[in-house]
């Protein structure tokens, strides 16, 4: 099989900054899909010595792997993720004390039952033109995995000093730029749960409108619909690859999962292209 497959009749989307993973589109407007993913960028793994940690964590002598496993273990990761998702941003309301007004701070309200409230708010801007959005996060969990966010390793003083009534706090607003919006939730969740199985399932799941694989006798429009759905899943893998690369993640399990998903989808692509060729031959005959 050649290095890439050519998919008929599917238009490419514009790409902004491909970080070593070029878009599928070529000059004629059709897709060319590499049979293998580009190798992950050689990012330096996060080192605890590089982080500004709370004194209690420093004195514990815990390793990075142990700290990350503890944050993710025993259901804690999902609780952290849910706590961040449940937090409400109240940026339209001025802080009660005008003396602490600061454009880099944002008011956030959490549930009284939250044992580990968020410590920062990410102001995420996407290079693919999607609207930016803000989400409360637990800084240490991100700093342990994303070198570009190492400065989130220590809880900001403002989160404690400016605690307010009604369970709201002022959190530091941190801007981050990533390439792709559509598949961002997959990587966001992986940062919290570290589950290769859940990530793989998300990457391989069919688009919302499930497309059945056509048999040899199906029409060209049916075949193109199947190819469209497959390209959407290939694009999903590429988007997670680009977002992880932009955060300089060096998690081997993450990159291995992306490789596995890509191999599965390329095998499906080979089968569909083979069916298309058989269909063309039968029409000629």
Image (tube, helix red, strand yellow):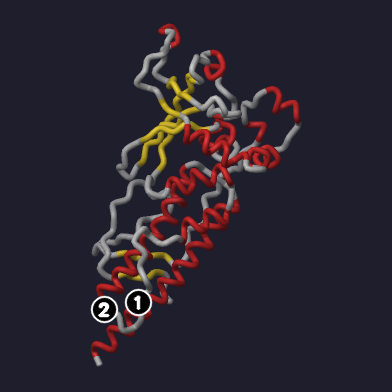
Q: How many marks?
A: 2
- Where does residue 50 sit, x and y in percent of width and height? 63, 31
Say if 122 sits above or below 242 in the image.
Answer: above
Q: Secondary structure at mark 2?
A: loop
Q: Residue furthest bottom?
A: 285
Tell which of 146 and 229 is nearer to you: 229
Decide: marks 1, 2 in contact (CB < 8 A)? yes
> In percent of the image, x 37 and y 48: which residue is there?
182
Rendered image quadrant of residue 154: top right
> In percent of the image, x 72 and y 37: which residue is there?
63
Q: Residues within 10 Å of mark 2 (few under 14, many from 20)?
A: few
Tell which of 268 and 95 is nearer to you: 95
Say if 48 sits above or below 222 in the image.
Answer: above
Q: Secondary structure at mark 1?
A: loop
Tell which of 152 and 51 is nearer to you: 152
Which quarter of the rendering shows the C terminus? bottom left
Q: Residues within 10 Å of mark 1 (few under 14, many from 20)?
A: some
> In percent of the image, x 25 and y 73: which residue is there?
221
- Where does residue 115 sit, x and y in percent of width and height? 60, 28
* The disc label shown at residue 70, or none: none
Question: Considering only order in the chain, which callout, 2 or 1, is on the residue closer to the N terminus?
Answer: 1
Say if 186 sits above or below 47 in the image.
Answer: below
Tell me the residue that label 1 is attached to.
Answer: 214
* The disc label shown at residue 219, or none: 2
> In percent of the image, x 38 and y 55: which residue is there?
22
């Amino acid at each position: 099989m050649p290095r890439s497959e050519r998919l008929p009749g599917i238009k490419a989307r514009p790409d902004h900054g491909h970080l070593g993973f070029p878009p599928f589109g070529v000059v004629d407007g059709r897709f060319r899909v590499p049979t293998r993913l580009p190798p992950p960028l050689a990012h330096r793994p996060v080192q605890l010595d590089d982080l500004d940690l709370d004194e209690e964590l420093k004195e514990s002598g815990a390793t990075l792997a142990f700290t990350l496993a503890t944050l993710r273990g025993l259901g804690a990761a999902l609780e952290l993720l849910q706590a961040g998702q449940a937090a409400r941003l109240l940026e339209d309301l001025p802080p009660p004390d005008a003396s602490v007004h600061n454009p880099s701070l944002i008011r956030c309200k959490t549930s009284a039952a939250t044992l580990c409230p968020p410590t920062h708010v990410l102001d995420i801007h996407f290079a693919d033109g999607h609207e930016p959005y803000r989400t409360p996060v637990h800084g240490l969990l991100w700093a342990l995995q994303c070198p570009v966010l190492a400065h989130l390793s220590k809880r900001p003083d403002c989160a404690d000093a400016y605690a307010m009534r009604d369970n709201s706090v002022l959190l530091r607003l941190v801007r981050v730029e990533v390439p792709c919006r559509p598949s961002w939730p997959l990587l966001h969740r992986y940062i919290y749960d570290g589950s290769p199985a859940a990530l793989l399932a998300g990457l391989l799941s069919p688009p919302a409108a499930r497309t059945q694989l056509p048999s040899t006798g199906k029409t060209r429009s049916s075949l193109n619909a199947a190819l469209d759905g497959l390209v959407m899943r290939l694009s999903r893998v590429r988007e997670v690859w680009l977002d992880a690369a932009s955060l300089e993640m060096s998690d081997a399990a993450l990159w291995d999962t992306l490789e596995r998903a890509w191999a599965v989808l390329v095998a499906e692509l080979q089968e569909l292209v083979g069916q298309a060729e058989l269909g063309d031959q039968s029409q000629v005959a």
